[in-house]
Amino acid sequence: MTIEKVKQEGGFFFPPGGILIWMVIIVEIITFAAGLTAFSVQRRSNIELFQKSAQMLNQGFALANTIILITGGYFMAMAISRLRQDDNRASSAWTLAAVFTGIAFLMLKGFEYYQKLEHGIGLEYNQFFNFYWLLTGFHYLHVLLGTMILLVMYFKIKKRIYNKNNLLDVETSAAFWHMCDLIWLLLFAVLYLIK
């Protein structure tokens, strides 16, 4: 079987987006998992502080951001689907919709950060918020990068630089975007829901 045939049929070395992005995704997930594990270990040694601090978080904002990112993931899946059907117009529209979900997430999270800082809750506030700022801040940077990448994809899809025969970069961008969704779901569960 030729390499081109394996690419067409899929396989371990040619998943959507290519093997390199999946290596990056695995490293990122391991990194966040290590941070969340350290958070959980520290939480066990100071449960009361962590519980009181968790109550200072805005669960409404976190839930809204969860819905926003999951919706953005759906939009990007639709963009890939339409591009595979050689419908660049619909694909670019779905990609732009995903960009707007990224912007919405960044704005809402930025407002949440602003509120925390207004109340003097920064990185050094306590051990819980040290983890909160590092973990959510690192994720924020990922969403910012992902949003910028999707914006580039939008313009290139619209100009038909990408199409059904040339969509690896778009699949790679979508895989990165879905990673942002997955990591947020982990952060949401551990930081906002576990009391």
Image (cartoon, grey):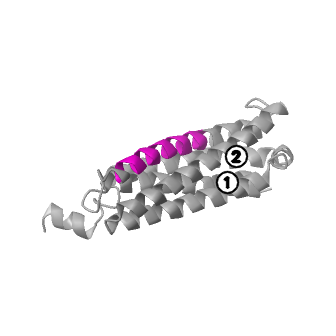
- Give residue 13's position: percent from left, percent from top: 28, 59
> What amino acid does circle 1 point to?
Asn
> What amino acid does circle 2 point to?
Leu
Left or right, 28 with respect to 114, comes to: left
Q: Residue at x 58, y 53 (%)?
A: 101
Marks 1/2: CA distance? 7 Å
Task: Name the quadrant containing residue 79.
Answer: bottom left
- Give residue 81's position: percent from left, percent from top: 39, 67
Few, some or many residues within 10 Å of mark 2 (<14, 14–19, 20+): some
Kindly identify which residue carries mark 2. Answer: 108
Kindly identify which residue carries mark 1. Answer: 65
Whichever of callouts 1 and 2 sits on the residue coming sooner in the sequence is 1
Visible in this render: residue 126?
Answer: no
Q: Residue at x 48, y 42 (%)?
A: 148
- Give residue 56's position: percent from left, percent from top: 84, 45
Task: Name the quadrant containing residue 132.
Answer: top right
Specify the segment rendered in magenta. Answer: 138-157
Contact flag, marks 1 and 2 (Cβ < 8 Å): yes
